[in-house]
Image: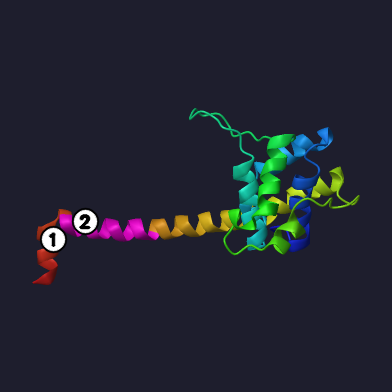
Amino acid sequence: MPLEKEDGAKVLQLITSRYNAREWRKKIEKTLSLPPSGLKDEDQRKAFLYLKVGLQAYKSRRADPPSWIVGGFATKEVIDRALFKPTVIDPSFTKDQVTGFFGEDPGSEVNEAWWEDMLVNWFEEPEEEGEDDTEDESSEESELSAEAGDDSDSKENPSHAKKTTT
């Protein structure tokens, strides 16, 4: 199931407060590589996408996987820009919303065990829904192809279709 509002806020706080801690950089990069659908709250999803796009390193148009600039002045600049002008994230954002998400440390309860649990929760529900959707789609496709096959038979054999109408 996607992360609840409290856990989503902790993820954003983790990204924006611990980016200079070497032991958290790889975990932050991994978090930025996750799809935004893991956050349930729409405002948190918008803030996450802002960080994801703002911290993404420039790459040529080859098939390289994306990488992120985590740590140092560039990261601080992206965070400070959002704190100074919240409308860069979304026109409806206020300064209070951004200060709630960015900059303050999430606390000592956010450790490696919490981070691993967060990763599990991030992907738990979308995978289950994806399996059910593919089964439904495949049954719908088979029904549509069967109907299309019936239509094509009547088009291929027009004399057969005429016999049934007379």
Q: Is residue 33 something one can see in this rendering?
A: yes
Residue at point 40%, 56% (across, down):
141
Residue 124 picture quarter: bottom right
The span shown in magenta is 143-155
Please state which of residues 80 and 107 is positioned toward the viewer in this rendering: 80
Residue 148 point in image, percent of width and height: 29, 58
User: Which residue bears the numbered disc 1?
Assistant: 160
Circle 1 residues within 10 Å: few <14, some 14–19, many ≥20? few
Mark 2 → mark 1, Cα distance in angstroms = 9 Å
Residue 81 on the magenta segment: no
Which of the numbered marks, if any, corresponds to residue 53? none
Residue 68 point in image, percent of width and height: 65, 35
Residue 100 point in image, percent of width and height: 76, 59
Q: Image check: 85 left or right of 163?
A: right
User: Which residue bears the numbered disc 2?
Assistant: 153
Q: Image check: 20 left or right of 46?
A: right
Residue at point 70%, 43% (across, down):
31
Residue 20 point in image, percent of width and height: 80, 37
Mark 2 and 1 residues: CB-CB less than 8 Å, in contact? yes
